């Protein structure tokens, strides 16, 4: 049975799908990277001042690292378990009390360490590119 | 009038009047969150945080003058808060659309036309559902209805999963029976 139009139809569909797939995989590389860096960005944001989660999300949403409560809350609780962060409750004028996060000494140390490492890394990449 | 279910959410003093399907969607969300947090030592606390956040948003709906919370309100709140992504264990599965370890072929009831076979195939293969259905219909005509038989066999043989989100969770779950 000869169905040339089916071939071209299928081919077009197939190409569109694979292109889409490659794009996804490419984007995924960066999202893995971002995912790994998110923790350090949180440390950096919290290092300045006590923040509550809505503020934290707001600050992140202005960057490439926009995220949601569903991701943030488990991460914050993990970081607290690791002793990098701690929180205290504060009443809020509207609605329920909020958790305000701040860095612990260990968190501060890790952030300083990361900043140093990050600089080494960028200068290394620059050098390798020469 | 649809039946209302009143629920309480962490740290919100007032009860929220939810329509029946809104209540079900919310329940499903928390069930899924609970399942994903079961290995998290602070899972209960994270759940309370999520409840508080969902509550804040539903509170906004009530403040805006609505007397009851519908499915769309709950879905909007869930979309903003996002599904639980713990990031550890199967570290990158949530962000990387790489081929997962287990790829069970199932039927998916959410949005099914007949038995959800195409829906399951689409989730399995990553092919768009509307394309897949078109192809299936086309092949049915082309094969003189033979595909109906194949469909019936699959409808009987395949296990059922309620929603696409459940299916993704199943696939991304750390190694286990799939």
Image (tube, coloured by chain):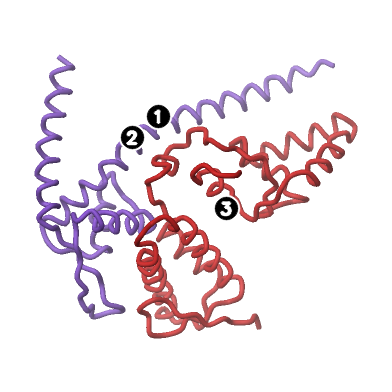
Chain colours: A purple, B red
Residue at the spot of label 2:
A30
Q: Residues within 10 Å of mark 2 (few under 14, many from 20)?
A: few
Determine whether the residue tagged by mark 1 lies in a helix, strand or loop.
helix
Determine whether the residue tagged by mark 2 lies in a helix, strand or loop.
helix
Residue at the spot of label 3:
B166
Give the mark toward the camera: 1 or 3.
3
Residue B144 in percent (x, y) is at 90, 32
Q: Is residue B134 above or below residue B72?
A: above
Residue at the spot of label 1:
A26
Determine whether the residue tagged by mark 3 lies in a helix, strand or loop.
helix
Please state the chain letter of the residue tagged with numbered disc 1 in the rendered image.
A
Using the rendered view, name the quadrant where residue A69 is placed.
Answer: bottom left
Mark 1 and mark 3: Cα distance apart in space: 26 Å
Left or right: where does residue B22 sit relative to residue B114?
left
Mark 2 and mark 1: Cα distance apart in space: 7 Å
Q: Is residue A106 above or below residue B53?
A: above
């Amino acid at each position: 049975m000869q169905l040339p139009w089916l071939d071209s139809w299928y081919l077009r569909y197939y190409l569109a799908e694979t292109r889409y797939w490659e794009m996804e995989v490419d984007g995924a590389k960066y999202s893995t990277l971002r995912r790994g860096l998110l923790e350090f960005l949180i440390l950096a944001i919290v290092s300045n001042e006590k923040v509550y989660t809505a503020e934290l999300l707001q600050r992140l949403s202005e960057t490439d690292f926009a995220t949601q409560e569903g991701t943030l809350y488990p991460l914050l609780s993990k970081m607290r378990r690791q002793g990098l962060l701690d929180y205290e409750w504060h009443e809020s004028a509207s609605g329920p009390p909020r958790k305000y996060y701040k860095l612990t000494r260990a968190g501060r140390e890790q952030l300083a360490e990361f900043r140093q490492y990050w600089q080494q890394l960028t200068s290394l990449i620059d050098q390798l590119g020469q | 009038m649809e039946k209302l279910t009143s629920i309480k959410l962490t740290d919100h003093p007032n009860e929220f009047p939810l329509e029946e399907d809104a209540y079900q969607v919310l329940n499903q969300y928390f069930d899924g969150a609970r399942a994903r947090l079961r290995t998290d030592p602070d899972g209960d606390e994270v759940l309370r945080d999520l409840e508080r956040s969902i509550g804040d948003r539903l509170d906004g709906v009530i403040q805006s003058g609505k007397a009851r919370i519908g499915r769309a309100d709950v879905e909007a709140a869930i979309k903003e808060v996002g599904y639980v992504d713990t990031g550890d264990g199967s570290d990158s599965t949530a962000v990387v659309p790489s081929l997962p370890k287990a790829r069970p072929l199932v039927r998916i009831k959410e949005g099914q036309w007949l038995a959800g076979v195409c829906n399951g195939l689409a989730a399995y293969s990553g092919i768009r559902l509307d394309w897949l259905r078109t192809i299936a219909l086309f092949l049915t005509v082309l094969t003189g209805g033979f595909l109906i038989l194949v469909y019936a066999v699959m409808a009987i043989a395949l296990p059922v999963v309620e929603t696409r989100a459940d299916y993704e969770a199943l696939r991304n779950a750390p190694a286990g029976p799939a």
